Amino acid sequence: MVKINLKGKDLITTRDWEVEEILQVLELAEEMQEKRFSPEFTCVLQNKSFLMFFYNPSVRTRQSFEIAATELGGHALFLEPKTMRLKSKKTAGETIEDAAKVMDRYGCGLGIRILEDKISTYGEGEKIIREYARHCDIPVVSMAHDKYHPCQGLADIMGYRRHLGSDLKNKTILHTWGHGALARSHCSVQESMLICSRLGMNVRLAHPEGYSLDEEVIGEVKKNCSETGSKFTITDDPVNAYKGADVVYSRNWMSEQAYAGEELNKEKEVEKALKLTDWICDEKKMEITDNALFSHPMPVDRGHEVTDGVASGSRSIIYDIAENRLHVQKAVMALTMSD
């Protein structure tokens, strides 16, 4: 593969990257996993600082980015809006332009995480990240926002390549809604569908009425599948959707009415979701797959999205994928932020 110069490139969604660029990240991530502490990589970001701006907390995201920066010889700095005087709809303060241009002078890259409960309408999180990117020369990386989660999508694909082979064409992934108590955003599943469809996988989407995903994303997935010769299907059947799947991705996400009144109605979302008890990934459903892998971006809502028997079963790759976050993020940082 011809090496592509990615220095300075933002990663807000893999949708913005060419397939060859995605494959370059994956191949480097696989090499970095194999040679984790090799001197070849331990000075890539020497004396450089990666700024991590968390509107929302995390477990894997903060740990994996901090460790990624350290293992590349750099440093990661944790930032929160409450520690900064930022302008908002309700408060006076510094504009995104001013904050971005200052951080641009300090760091080698800026990561931003902004999810469902920190916004008032769908799409607002992405708008904020792209506004930061507009005022920064350093690369801006989404560490998850309301529409997309690019590093998670890369980590997912890295896991499928390891367990199913590097050529994923004609493998089938089922993205199925799972009932749960978390009222999650669409970001992980939408990113997964986009990247899987671009790499030739058949994409199957299953959800109950009222839980449709972004129409623009659905349209893009259909287009990707048409271009790669793969299949895209949508069903409301919580059982037959599993037939013949090679990967099962069971994940709760919020309904189309989540932001009625321009605020996240979390209690109503949870109450409504918990009534749909047919929508859980269990051993019986997994039996009608093609010995499918179980995938999930974590944290797992066990007993709702999936049973313990599946999540901790022999075909579960959730911990492999969690580990992959470290390696794909190292690869992204090395390719976009190093000299």
Image (cartoon, rainbow, N blue to C red):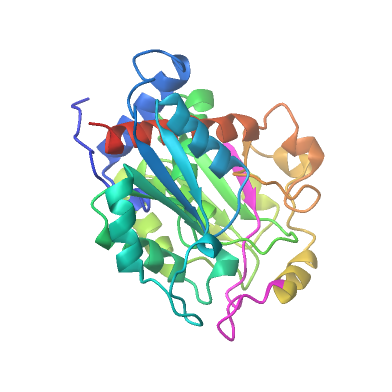
Which residue is drawn at the image coordinates 39% and 55% (left, top)?
221
Which residue is drawn at the image coordinates 34% and 35% (left, top)?
48
Q: Is residue 81 left or right of residue 237?
A: left
Count of marks overlaid on the render: 0
Q: Is residue 244 left or right of residue 230?
A: right
- Tell me where residue 298 appears, x and y as whole percent: 64, 44
Is residue 141 covered in magenta? no
In the displayed orientation, state which residue is furthest to the bottom.
Answer: 261
Is residue 255 covered in magenta? yes
Q: Is residue 109 left or right of residue 177?
A: left
Identify whether 301 is placed above or below 218.
above
Q: Nearer the viewer, residue 42 or 93?
A: 93
- Tell me where residue 150 appears, x and y as whole percent: 43, 47
Q: Main secondary structure of the magenta part?
A: loop
Q: Which residues are magenta?
A: 244-266
Q: Nearer the viewer, residue 56 or 220?
A: 56
Which residue is drawn at the image coordinates 65% and 66% (left, top)?
208
Identify whether 171 is placed above or below 9.
above
- Tell me where residue 126 appears, x and y as whole percent: 41, 64
Asked if one can make out residue 10 in the rendered structure from this viewpoint, the answer is no
Toward which corner of the image does residue 101 lie, by quadrant? bottom left
Quarter holding the N terminus is top left
